[in-house]
């Protein structure tokens, strides 16, 4: 379920990027709303991935009768490799949304609303 969520949001983000690149100014409010939604969904997906990573460490500790802190994260790398690949793949998309697209779209909307209200 964790991988399916990250995969789904990743594909939706890729679709959004295409709309952003090809978008017209009349679509900016919807693009901004979609970007904020996708950014939040990616954040939640990352949180779930990190929780899954912690679960794998705890599960290994229980099965081997060891303490949680004695498990090196590299010991579960094989079990987490699929999730790790999606995590690495999705981080640039989250950065694009949070630090580039959302601020740019917000600034564009502020400028356009100021221009419309100016005498």
Image: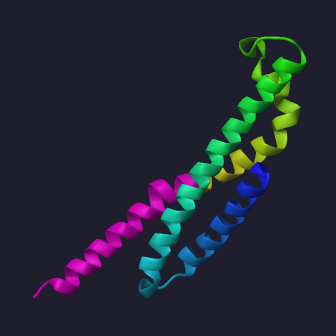
The main secondary structure of the magenta stretch is helix
Q: In the image shown, does 4 or 78 lie closer to the viewer?
A: 4
Residue occupying the point 69% across, 60% down: 10
- The magenta segment: 94-119
Q: Is residue 91 above or below residue 102?
A: above
Q: Point out residue 68 in the picture as x, y percentages from the top left corner.
A: 74, 16
Q: Point out residue 71 in the picture as x, y percentages from the top left corner.
A: 78, 16
Is residue 54 found left or right of 99 in the rendered image?
right
Residue occupying the point 62% across, 43% down: 47
Query: Is residue 117 in the magenta section?
Result: yes
Task: Give the quadrant of the C terminus.
Answer: bottom left
Q: Point out residue 39 in the picture as x, y percentages from the top left corner.
A: 54, 58
Give the colour scheme shown: rainbow
Q: Point out residue 6 in the picture as x, y percentages from the top left corner.
A: 71, 54
Residue occupying the point 83% across, 39% down: 81
Q: In the image shown, does 51 or 93 lie closer to the viewer?
A: 51
Query: Is residue 96 in the magenta section?
Result: yes
């Amino acid at each position: 379920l964790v991988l399916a969520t990250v995969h789904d949001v990743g594909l939706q983000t890729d679709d959004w990027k295409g709309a952003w690149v090809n978008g017209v100014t009349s679509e900016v409010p919807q693009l901004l709303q979609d970007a904020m939604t996708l950014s939040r969904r990616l954040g939640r997906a990352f949180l779930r991935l990190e929780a899954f990573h912690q679960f794998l460490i705890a599960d290994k500790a229980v099965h081997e009768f060891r303490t949680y802190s004695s498990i090196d994260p590299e010991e579960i790398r094989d079990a987490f490799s699929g999730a790790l690949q999606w995590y690495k793949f999705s981080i640039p998309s989250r950065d694009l949304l949070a630090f580039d697209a959302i601020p740019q779209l917000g600034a564009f909307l502020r400028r356009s609303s100021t221009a419309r209200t100016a005498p």
